[in-house]
Amino acid sequence: MTNTPGQKTVFNLNPYLELNNHGKVMRLELTGSRHVFGRDRGSGADLLVPSDWQIIGRAHAVLTKVGSEYHIYDGDGQRPSTNGLFIDRTRITPKEGFLLRDGTQIRIGQNPKDQILLTYINPASAGAPPTVRSLTLAGRSVVLGRDPACNLQLDAPIVSRRHAVIDNYTITDYSTNGVFVNDQRVKTSQRLTDGATIRIGPFTLLLRGDELQVLDRGSQIRLDAEGLVREVWVYEEINKKKVKVLKGLLKQVTLAIEPGQFVALVGGSGTGKSTLMRTLLGIDPTDKGRVYINGDDLRTTFNIYRTQIGYVPQDDIIHDQLTVREVLTYAAKLRLPPDTDVESVVEKTLTEIEMGDRETVLVSKLSGGQRKRVSIGVELLADPKLFFLDEPTSGLDPGLDKKMMQLLRKLADQGRTIVLVTHATANIKLCDRVVFMGRGGHPCYFGPPDEAFQFFRINSGDFADIYNELEQGEEHAAQWANIFRQSPYYRTYVDNHLSTGKGSSIAPPSQVKPSGLQQLSLLTQRYFKLVQRDQINLGLVLLTAPIGISLITLAIRDQDPLIGEPEATLAPLALRVLFVFTCAAIWIGLSTSLQEIVKEWAIYMRERLVNLGLFPYLGSKLLILGGLALLQTVLMVAAILIGFKSPQPELIPWAIGVAISTILTLFTSMSLGLLVSALVKNSSQANSSLPLLLLPQIIFAGVLFSMEGVGRVISWVMLSRWSVGAYGSLVNVNAMVPEATVLPDGSMMPLPFEPSAIYEPTWANLGLNWGMLLLHATVYLGLTLWVQKRKDIF
Ligand SMILES: Nc1ncnc2c1ncn2[C@@H]1O[C@H](COP(=O)(O)OP(=O)(O)OP(=O)(O)O)[C@@H](O)[C@H]1O
């Protein structure tokens, strides 16, 4: 029977199902007290659909009459169907089912390209059938975006005001966060063919003929994990021998998390909670099994979802030296499209996290719970519908723990799907589902918190007793996991809800990269503010070298080491002074930069996972550190000019030459510092590495010891050698060596310093020294980029 979708057909006023399979519409009248809907009469179906509508099962749903309406159950009433029945993204189960009302829309299947829309219509009821929001593309150009003036308004923070334009069936991307057509990112523009799915932020649109339909507003996100297994090779001590063994971190974890659910992952220390969360979030790989987000394989489609997922890791993802409002403002500018009204988004977020009265306070002055709330606020800016939190209440007192859990409950009630790892069980009852993990990564229970007591046969009502039950070793945990898999709890809460979807047949879509220049400018402003806020550190960084240089003048009292008539001790003295210039610059350069990447590791990793560019990030470091190097150079050169009588180099005025040599030494050592900062794991390692970096620079500079053989080769990779070389050639140390004195016996009096090619006062030599410093800096920065790139998860 053909008809216009949504138009009420009257079958003697009986309710009916309207099925829309990509424009092909059919209606099935409901007359009996029980119907089975499917494509195979042999399986008991009496409401039959064409046998080539493969997405519908042989017996896909059961309908039973309740008063004047019908209740629908998935599958044959016992076992769920393969492709399911979904209201938004929530799956209807075989057990609870769903009471249909006039106009209820149910989707069969999760993949928009292969999905049938089922609408229940009861002409006897007053409701008007909902229509799918759509617009025609025939003969017109349409603008899609957040702006209400667009032809199709897509209202979400991560959508740009004018996000994309479709003209003559060609879509052009004008956005920050990109457009995906058939799960591939649109580079600039792309022709749309019939049946194309378009994803813009959380929205999924479908082109059917001339009609562009809004299929999914993305306000509901479900997460399904099927058979997750993760194993790693580790060294274990067995019989006093280190043996390499395969350690299971996750063992066959299968979960079905419905939209809007608040789920806690709990269990003893080391049971794999964080690993499970990172796997569900898509950032840890699996050896077997998959995670599906709204039916898509999360690992392959991560680039589509990356801006829609919120993640608060264990470490704070906010800078200590910014105020609450500044943290939120910079994060909003970094993550949201540039046409966003940042102020109102920040305002809304401050209210949501109840921090409006603390907005001007520095993060460092906040309590642990308040800091966590600001981290949550940073993630809420983009209004994600899927939210992960790793131990957000650790270290909080019981009162704050409760407040935090209540806040998360509120966020879930607003439609967000929330997954958290926690050790605190006092408020777990606020969750919809709890996952108990046992030793060895065994999932021992998944279901409502209250029912966990019945399952584990614990009467105390204390979750800690379930912990203790699962702490009795891996085998014990494996037994519980086995009991759970065979239990009705598994059928009710996992099997009946599990909705896996598309595998990884598509090529992973590429990432959308926002404007590098804009990020560079934002990151530079933020970094500048951070440096400026830490005034004591800034003062130390700027004044240490000039003070050190001034102290030399006290040590050498009346001598003028950089000028003077050649005499036996002048050249070594001059070289020692120049060596102090070099050491001061290297020391200051390293200590200014060694912490700069490692100290904000957690923030970097989180921002990188959203959209942070590597070049803008390192670029901002270079700009600010370069600025600091310039200031330090001015102060050091001033101290040198004031403290020492200036030589008159033939090549270049002394002040300019010494400034260039100093800034190059500082910049190169800062680049080395950044590299080490990228390599080390924590701030104390960065601190401890300073002597190790400095000592070889001192030993192999060629000043304390003359460099021969291997030492000479090693000295080439020391920036100190080129720095002293540059200063030495400007001062012309070689010219300070007097003529060798011939002793009465005809032998030569040994001189304490031999002229060396390293200090030749020629442009070639000076250029070589400066060039080598630049080369060192380039190599260090290139390596830093590479090291940072290697940390990327996607
Ligand atoms: N990449 C890895 N390589 C080797 N072992 C790992 C790796 N990741 C995690 N582990 C180990 O797997 C186990 C589970 O770690 P995980 O951090 O997931 O546990 P957890 O339950 O979150 O612990 P906690 O509550 O103490 O934070 C631990 O023993 C951990 O040392």
Image: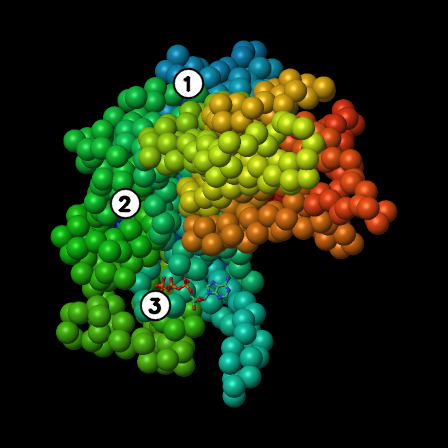
Residue at 33% across, 60% down: 265
Q: Nearer the viewer, residue 142 or 593?
A: 593
> Compared to 587, does 234 lie above or below?
below
Question: Residue 593, how many percent across, how many down?
Answer: 49, 39
User: Foreground mark, 3 or 1?
Assistant: 3
Task: Label 1: state its secondary structure.
Answer: loop
For label 2, the crowd category at 10 Å Cα-Cα, with few meaning under 14, some 14 to 19 and many 20 or more, is many
Q: Is residue 156 visible?
A: no
Q: Is mark 3 within 8 Å of ligand 1?
A: yes
Task: Label 3: state its secondary structure.
Answer: loop
How far is the residue under mark 1 from the one under mark 2? 28 Å
Task: Label 2: state its secondary structure.
Answer: helix
* Marker disc for residue 372: 2
Please give the residue where the numbered disc 3 appears in the rendered image. 269
Q: Is mark 1 within 8 Å of ligand 1?
A: no
Q: Nearer the viewer, residue 564 or 420?
A: 564
Residue at 51% across, 46% down: 677
User: Foreground mark, 1 or 2?
Assistant: 2
Question: Residue 214, how many percent across, how many down?
Answer: 44, 28
How far is the residue under mark 2 from the one under mark 3? 21 Å
Which amino acid, by three-letter code, is at mark 1?
A: Asp
Which amino acid, by three-letter code, is at mark 3?
A: Ser
Please give the residue where the numbered disc 1 appears in the rendered image. 339
- Sequence-wise, which precedes: disc 1 or disc 2? 1
Question: Residue 468, how many percent across, how many down?
Answer: 26, 76
Q: Are marks 2 and 3 in contact (CB under 8 Å)?
A: no
Query: Residue 154: which quarter of the image?
Result: top left
Query: Residue 735: which quarter of the image?
Result: top right
Residue at 29% across, 58% down: 422
How far is the residue under mark 3 from the one under mark 1? 45 Å
